[in-house]
Amino acid sequence: MSTLILWSLPESAGCVRNMFFTAADIARQIQGEVLGDGSVPLTGVAPADHAQRGELTYAENEDYFARAEQSAASAILADRNFSSAQKVVIRVPNARAAFARVVTLFFPPPQYAPGIHPSAVVASSAQVDPGAHVGPLCDCQLGEDAHLFPNVTLYPRTQIGQRVAIHSGTVIGSDGFGYVFDQGVRRKVPQVGNVVIHDDVEIGANVTIDRGALGSTVVGQGTKIDNLVQIGHNVVIGEHCIIIAQVGIAGSTRVGSYATLAGQVGIAGHLKVGNQVTVSAQAGVMNDIPDGEKWLGSPAQPDRQMKRIWVAMHRLPELLKRVSGIEKKLDKEPRKKPTR
Amino acid sequence: MSTLILWSLPESAGCVRNMFFTAADIARQIQGEVLGDGSVPLTGVAPADHAQRGELTYAENEDYFARAEQSAASAILADRNFSSAQKVVIRVPNARAAFARVVTLFFPPPQYAPGIHPSAVVASSAQVDPGAHVGPLCDCQLGEDAHLFPNVTLYPRTQIGQRVAIHSGTVIGSDGFGYVFDQGVRRKVPQVGNVVIHDDVEIGANVTIDRGALGSTVVGQGTKIDNLVQIGHNVVIGEHCIIIAQVGIAGSTRVGSYATLAGQVGIAGHLKVGNQVTVSAQAGVMNDIPDGEKWLGSPAQPDRQMKRIWVAMHRLPELLKRVSGIEKKLDKEPRKKPTR
Amino acid sequence: MSTLILWSLPESAGCVRNMFFTAADIARQIQGEVLGDGSVPLTGVAPADHAQRGELTYAENEDYFARAEQSAASAILADRNFSSAQKVVIRVPNARAAFARVVTLFFPPPQYAPGIHPSAVVASSAQVDPGAHVGPLCDCQLGEDAHLFPNVTLYPRTQIGQRVAIHSGTVIGSDGFGYVFDQGVRRKVPQVGNVVIHDDVEIGANVTIDRGALGSTVVGQGTKIDNLVQIGHNVVIGEHCIIIAQVGIAGSTRVGSYATLAGQVGIAGHLKVGNQVTVSAQAGVMNDIPDGEKWLGSPAQPDRQMKRIWVAMHRLPELLKRVSGIEKKLDKEPRKKPTR
């Protein structure tokens, strides 16, 4: 369809390249100190649970440092007094700020040029807008029978499954909202992950789904998303969910399968919402929700509990009067002399 | 204006065509059983209150079945044990799921081609973007002095009145959010209605207004809609309303005239909000609201009632102490011997 | 990038022109009465605190009339019985409705034509889409290293600073939501201000930022705005703020620097939110918030206060039982004879 935007990063960014920095190179760039072998070659960055040999990971606290040591990563970026016998440590004053700068070393900002690069892989059956930029090597993937309505924007490396429909104005793969507060300013953490939309998903109009910071934001098979919904970076949504209009799900939250999120629900980040959960309209979820439960309210509570509170709230004005009545009654009581 | 998208369905879809299926044809397609004359020709589908002779309607319960029998429809799609002396019944295991499939028979999914089809009716005064697709026979209608800013998307059969302004990024006529849960998956209910915007309406930026499932989503004359508002399928809004940013109105709700919905209000579906109603910011409306009333809160309540509760809530921490005080006082009371 | 829309008003609108109306001209157009010298030339309109000599201002009440008299304006549009010894008064039945009509005299609605007007000033380094309309004389300003992703719309006279990134689908400069209720209909107040985005701001996808009614809507340096946020007309946001997804800020509110507004927060209009304020997710702010405070809830309250109330609300069902218990106990008490 004429206004589909297929969009990719050129060769110089966004793809794993045959390139490395040594730990000492990186330390020099970010005013860090190397503990261990500074010549170890590092080919990329990853969170601990995804890191492979030759990659750099980072840790903000003891928990994460322990995981980093157990991972396959070859080096760890850390602050404070962390040190390791097994892995090279690059020590910095602020690990999170330093990590943002390291990511930029491995993923320099892209340079865009219009047109379809000769090395791009575009299926002969794809309909690509003449105004679109499709860069070399990297590309978005669209499954069979994908239907993108006019004015849909796909950012680089978006993967769309089969029989997916995406309505107008929707944006898939915009930068996740990641900033680290560093010396009085908010520094951007480059968002170099992507978005994966599985088969049979339908997405409404003017929806925004952010790319992962590292890794993917995922929408599971058969899930249906209504208009004006916001999905934050690295959110993972299960299968056959219903997400109604104007819901917002903050980064890194996981939602199970067959969940129903009613209109204007907000879900905080880093939570786990179970399978077959129902969240009522306008609820504000600040805690994990176990499988099968129904939660209401803001802050959200389990159904029964919240309704009991709401019913009680209606009786509150009258309760104040009842208590005043009791107090008056008690004040009138003559002072009791203790019985002999 | 250069980026207006005027968009229609081609001949093969979205328009009433000179075509019919017999009740027996339809029953065969959806594994149903015909009770009555299977040769009756059916030319379309409609809800009971709009159905005309020769059309098929459907019923999910006794209420709806009674209405269907009283309608002018020639046949009724129903489940359970419904039967009728007056009309042909097509009996299926799940009426709602079957209806979704029947709609697809009458409205097969469209095939889009760029350019203006020779048979499309486009006014000589209309400014149509060269990249737009305007299909045969069907067309959107725009009144005089309609002003669509860049990047507005109109889906097929949208009707826009006179002196209407629509700001950038707005999407009118995207599919309503309709799914029926059938054997473990969520099947799409085709949304084949449209959107009607009356004269003197102004719509802000990045608004989404869904087409009706069957029939129209309507915005009445003189109503003003702010940015990022969501209007669900088959919502009917009266005249001269004010709908402030980020409001969401769920499907089939009716809003009267001169209503004011403040920022971020949510209104559930199938409700009736009266004339000259005011709903305060962030309220969550779950009930009908009579004419002239003002409601607040989530779940929303009438103004006075909600304010009384909010005032009482502020006194609640102190009330807990007062009651503890009373309980202590009563515990100190010596045991009373009954008087002789 | 190919789909950037750079957009300006043509010469006939939106710019201060070498043109004037006399007070008598204006009074005639709006059925007003001149008190004072009707021949005084008026070259523009402005609010009292910005008005310069030769401009017209307006006043709705005693307060505003006093300020108007102290301003540098040459004439005042007012209703009721206002009069002035120092300035010409144009008296009308409804000052606000009349002002809306006067603004249209000075800023007639624009006529758009595609292409780049010879007199437009476009930097040689700017990348302008061939489909964009760039009108004569007036133009948007983009600083160095500004990065606008596909499908961003800038309305006329938008000013963008350096190193600003704006993600897809965002609309900057759409009309503020201004209407005056006049004789049964809602008349549009022309929105002829603009939007100013300072250096190092990053704006997410599908955000809407309205132009000022008169004067500017401003986003301060280093502020980061997430997806689907709404910023109303004449809002002024300070530096290095964090505004998370789906927040809505109503017109004329001022937010300080280093403020954090969490997801789905709503802030009413004409408020002052201080520096280093934190507003928690889904809160509804209806009052000014002093520097450094943290507020929660809807209606929002200071942190400690709201949490105390929420904790107490959980104890409310049990409290009802405790009070019933007290009442039963008191009813069982035998009637006390007063002691002799």
Image (spheres, coloured by chain):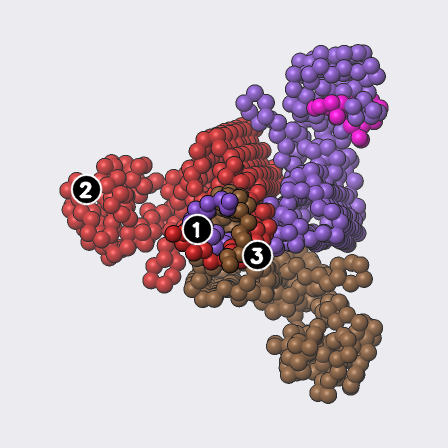
Chain colours: A brown, B red, C purple
A7 or A45: which is nearer to us?
Answer: A45
Q: Is residue C136 magenta?
A: no
Closer to the chain start, of discs 1 and 3, is 3
Q: Estimate the spatial distance between the alpha carbons at disc 2 and disc 1, rounded to whole Å.
A: 72 Å
Which residue is located at x 84 percent, y 17 percent? C86
Q: Disc number at residue B87?
A: 2
Q: Residue C60 in magenta?
A: yes
Chain to which mark 2 belongs = B
Residue A335: mark in rendering: none
User: Disc 3 to disc 2, how far (Cα)?
Assistant: 60 Å
Residue at 53 percent across and 44 percent down: it is: A332
The magenta-colored residue range is C48-65
- The image quadrant of residue C156 is top right
Q: Amino acid at mark 2?
A: Lys
From the viewer's perspective, is A78 left or right of C281?
right
Report the residue marked by disc 1. C333
Which of discs 2 and 1 lies nearer the camera? The answer is 1
Residue at the extreme bottom of the image, as rendered: A85
Callout in the foreground (1, 3): 1
Decide if residue C10 is in sight here.
Answer: no
Q: Quadrant of residue B66?
A: top left
Residue at 43% across, 56% down? B337
Residue A31: % across, % down: 83, 73
Badges 1 and 3: C-beta atoms under 8 Å apart?
Answer: no
Q: Secondary structure at mark 2?
A: loop
